Image (cartoon, rainbow, N blue to C red):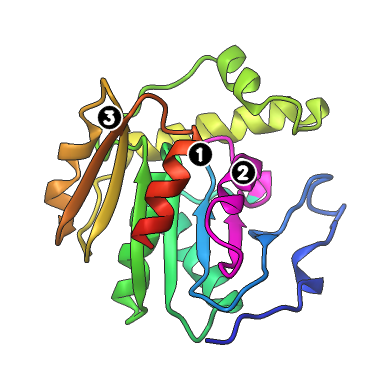
């Protein structure tokens, strides 16, 4: 498989659009020749949360983040957003195949992208859903959301990120998932019912694991590495 290594097009600032225009696909760790993993952003749109996970997936595994589009280019549905991200993923990995992974809202979106890529005849090798529920989406308070973002963000972007989160939450509330054909890894918090809820939307085996904390990548990373 050939992985595109020219990332010059992935970093730009167009001040006529927004001061924070960002590329959809960002390299996290592009070394390696194995099938790449595309990590889909959580509800606020950032992919910095996956940096530690990338270190747990082996030295020969390229890892990319799929992060939110500009604030004034928000689509009207999860399906439309998935179609846009499918376009962007194919720009980077046109030869396929790909692995898809998402945390929380990112899992819902990763599933939708997988369905869209398969609709186009694409090869999705694996789908990993971390702390994601296909039908129930409990919103977080702005304070809790900013706390989880930690020090990795520019605090001047707080209003933009919270607005993106609110928009994405509204998309999730209106979304009814399609059916992904293949085996999926579903990792849930110990008190979650999200794992079994995925069965109607996955035509294949659902490998379910419960962990104390789905974003503890020291633990979850080993499960993901074995699966992909």
Look at mark 3 in the image and give the residue it sits on.
136
Look at mark 2 in the image and give the residue it sits on.
52
Give the foreground label among 3 and 2.
Answer: 2
Q: Depth check: 119 or 114 in front?
A: 114
Q: Secondary structure at mark 3?
A: loop
The boundaries of the magenta stretch are 43-72
Characterize the local packing of mark 3: few (<14), some (14-19) or many (20 or more) Cα atoms within 10 angstroms.
few
Q: Image quarter for residue 8?
A: bottom right
Q: Is residue 46 left or right of residue 224?
A: right
Q: How many marks?
A: 3
* 119 relative to 201, above or below: below
Q: Image quarter for residue 48?
A: top right
Are the residues flagged by discs 2 and 1 in contact, CB closer than 8 Å?
yes
Spatial CA span between label 3 and label 2: 27 Å
Are the residues flagged by discs 3 and 2 in contact, CB closer than 8 Å?
no
Q: Position of residue 221 (x, y in %)?
A: 47, 46
Characterize the local packing of mark 2: few (<14), some (14-19) or many (20 or more) Cα atoms within 10 angstroms.
some
Residue located 36% across and 35% down the image: 131
Name which of mark 3 and mark 2 comes first in the sequence.
Answer: 2
- Picture disc at residue 217: 1
Q: Position of residue 156 (x, y in %)?
A: 82, 27
């Amino acid at each position: 498989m050939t992985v595109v290594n020219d990332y010059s097009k992935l970093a730009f600032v167009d001040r006529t659009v927004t001061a924070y225009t960002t590329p959809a696909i960002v390299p996290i760790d592009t070394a390696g020749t194995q099938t790449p993993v595309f990590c889909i952003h959580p509800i606020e749109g950032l992919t910095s949360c996956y940096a530690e996970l990338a270190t747990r997936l082996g030295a020969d595994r390229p890892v990319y983040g799929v992060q939110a589009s500009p604030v004034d280019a928000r689509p009207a549905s999860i399906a439309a957003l998935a179609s846009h991200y499918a376009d962007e993923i194919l720009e980077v990995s046109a030869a396929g195949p790909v692995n898809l992974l998402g945390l929380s809202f990112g899992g819902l979106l990763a599933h939708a992208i997988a369905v869209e890529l398969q609709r186009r005849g694409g090869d999705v090798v694996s789908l990993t859903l971390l702390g994601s529920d296909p039908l129930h989406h409990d919103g977080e308070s702005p304070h809790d959301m900013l706390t989880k973002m930690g020090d990795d963000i520019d605090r001047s972007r707080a209003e933009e990120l919270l607005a993106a989160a609110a928009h994405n939450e509204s998309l999730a509330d209106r979304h009814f998932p399609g059916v992904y054909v293949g085996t999926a890894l579903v990792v849930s918090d110990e008190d979650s019912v999200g794992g079994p809820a995925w069965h109607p939307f996955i035509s294949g085996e659902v490998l379910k694991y419960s962990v104390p904390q789905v974003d503890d990548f020291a633990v979850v990373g080993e499960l993901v590495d074995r699966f992909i």
